Image (cartoon, rainbow, N blue to C red):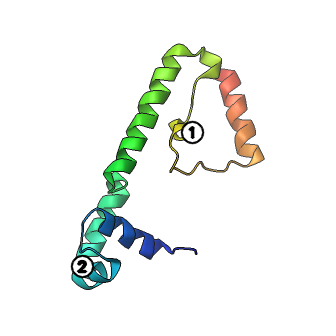
Amino acid sequence: MAIDEESEFFCELVSCGIGGQTIAEARRNLSYAELQTWRAYRQKYGSLFVGRRLEQEFGRLFARYMNTKLPADKQIEDPRIYMVHEEMPVLTYEEERMKQIEKKKSG
């Protein structure tokens, strides 16, 4: 079953205890203005779910730690590879090639 963006947002709110104990309660209890405020907050600061925030911080920490142990040519550029619930952007061939060229110039 696919979930639309709005339902996913309500799931996150309810799982954090915002608006009620069910999605139906949250839809009834939250005004449009309050919903927009929560949406803006999430857009600015990221996930409302504490577990997701911990996952992101541990991913960043692990990437930083690994970069102190790895040679310069094998540095980890994107800590999202250690974050199970984060989506990695799909690069086109041209973007990947430009990334390799820039890496050669700086190295």
**In the foreground, 25 or 92:** 25
Identified by mark 1, the residue type is Ile
Circle 2: is it few (<14), some (14-19), or many (20+) Cα within 10 Å? Answer: some
Q: How crowded is mark 1: few (under 14 residues within 10 Å), some or many (20 or more)?
A: some
Q: Pinpoint residue 3: horizontal percent, then vertical percent.
A: 52, 73
Q: Is residue 29 above or below residue 93?
A: below
Q: Quadrant of residue 17?
A: bottom left
Q: Is mark 2 on a helix, strand or loop?
A: loop
Q: Which x, y percent locates residue 47?
A: 37, 55
Q: Which mark is residue 30?
A: 2
- Residue 86, relative to residue 1: is it above or below? above
In space, the residues marked 2 and 1 are separated at their CA atoms by: 35 Å
Mark 2 residue type: Leu
Assign the N terminus to one quadrant of the image: bottom right
Q: Which residue does the numbered mark 1 point to in the structure image?
A: 81
Left or right of residue 35: residue 107: right
Asked whether, in this view, residue 104 is left or right of residue 5, the answer is right
Left or right, 98 with respect to 42, comes to right
Q: Residue at x 60, y 14 (%)?
A: 71
Q: Quadrant of residue 96?
A: top right
Reply above or below: 96 against 7: above
Camera-side residue: 4 or 42?
Answer: 4
Residue extending farthest to the front is: 21
Q: In this view, does 93 lie above or below 74?
A: below
Q: Which residue is drawn at 52% across and 21% down?
A: 67
Q: Residue at x 66, y 50 (%)?
A: 90
- Of all residues, the one furthest to the bottom in this rendering is 28
Q: Position of residue 101 (x, y in %)?
A: 72, 30
Whether residue 5 is visible here, answered yes or no, is: yes
